[in-house]
Amino acid sequence: MSIFKIKLIDEIILSYMKNTIELSPLSTFTSGFTLVDFDKIEVYIKSFSKVELYEGNINIYFNDDLRYGIMSYLYGSEFICKDNVDDFFVDHVIKNNISELLSLERFDSCLRNESSIYHKYMFKFNLFSSEVYIEFKKDVVDSLYVKEFGVDPKRRMNESLIKSIAMKKLIDVDIGLLEQSFDMNTILNLKVGDVIKTNRKKKDGLQILYKESILANNIFISENDTSKLIIG
Amino acid sequence: MNNNNEFSNKLFSNLQVQLELKVGEITTSVNSVLEIKPGDVLDTEMKISDSVSLLYEGNEIASGILIERDGYFGIQIKRVTN
């Protein structure tokens, strides 16, 4: 398995998490996946409760603290007690609310099993001071791979082919200016009608930006019937 | 209230904040971005006369119109986000 292909699969999983669970801070997540020994993780979460989504292709593991946290969050701490919660009811509530609740949180690690790269990915969250793991099964990862790149992940591919597919992926880039310094007082007291000056000369043009990186530094916009970006 | 304002003005008088100015957004392929070189011309549907956003850590704090002031880019504020 080439490193490049592994990175692509990581990207697919991350974009899936972003699009479906809508983890808003995900775009700032850059540290990548941590390789782990899943046997140890599985022993560790053995006592956790499990909720299955999509016929077991996505599993959510959580411990008792999460049960109490979610039920208290939804119904109030005085309504529910830790020891008398009906398991079936709690599982039902968690299943129906977990995506929304996790969307408010940032996951603090992504775990990947190196030996069976397509088999398991896990995301660890800290929600209500509880650890939550989301596990993606092989079929989900495979189907996302096919959807993203239009090829079967089991098919043997050379790196240049994978690269050429990745290069055709569409991305949104910003046109603007990164890291413009302004006086804090000016910004705090900003009101309609104010004019604030950047530290960028107009003759230097704008920038093409992608995730806080500058891709091109001297961009000029020509506007007639349609706008054109001229790379300087 | 005025004392509070004076206090905060003094407190922040020497502080600078880093903001991003977003004029527009275009969708393009990874390949096109990586191959950009001086002299290239890209067609877009972006209108520079449309609202320009002032962003702090990705969140819009104000918007306005892109202008030139003393040879530098500037923004005339049209809306301040609460």
Image: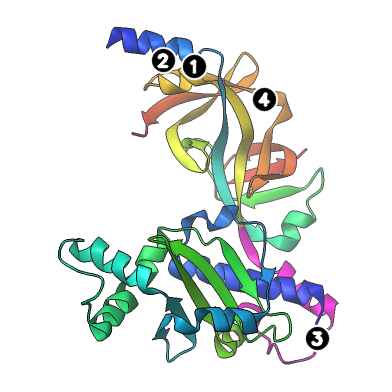
Residue neighbourhood size for the residue with mark 2, other residues' Cα within 10 Å, grouped as few (<14), some (14–19), many (≥20): few
- Disc on res. B34: none
Looking at the rendering, which quadrant does residue A43 occupy? bottom right
Q: Amino acid at mark 4?
A: Lys
- The residue mark sitting in front, 3 or 4, is 3
Q: CA distance from mark 3 to mark 4?
A: 47 Å
Q: Which residues are magenta?
A: A145-171
Query: Could you say which is closer to the camera, residue A197 or residue A16?
Result: A16
- Disc on res. B12: 1
- Where is residue A185 shown, x and y percent of the image? 47, 17
The tag earlier along the polypeptide, 3 or 4, is 3
- Where is residue A108 shown, x and y percent of the image? 55, 60
- Using residue B52 as the reference point, say whether residue A90 is left or right of it: left
The answer to whether residue A224 is above or below residue A145 is: above
Q: CA distance from mark 2 to mark 3?
A: 61 Å
Q: Secondary structure at mark 3?
A: loop
Q: CA distance from mark 2 to mark 4?
A: 33 Å
Q: Amino acid at mark 3?
A: Met
| Label 2: chain letter | B
- Disc on res. B8: 2
Residue, disc 4:
A202
Judge if badges 3 and 4 mark residues of a common chain.
yes
Q: CA distance from mark 1 to mark 4?
A: 28 Å
- Where is residue A120 shown, x and y percent of the image? 61, 83
Residue, disc 3:
A157
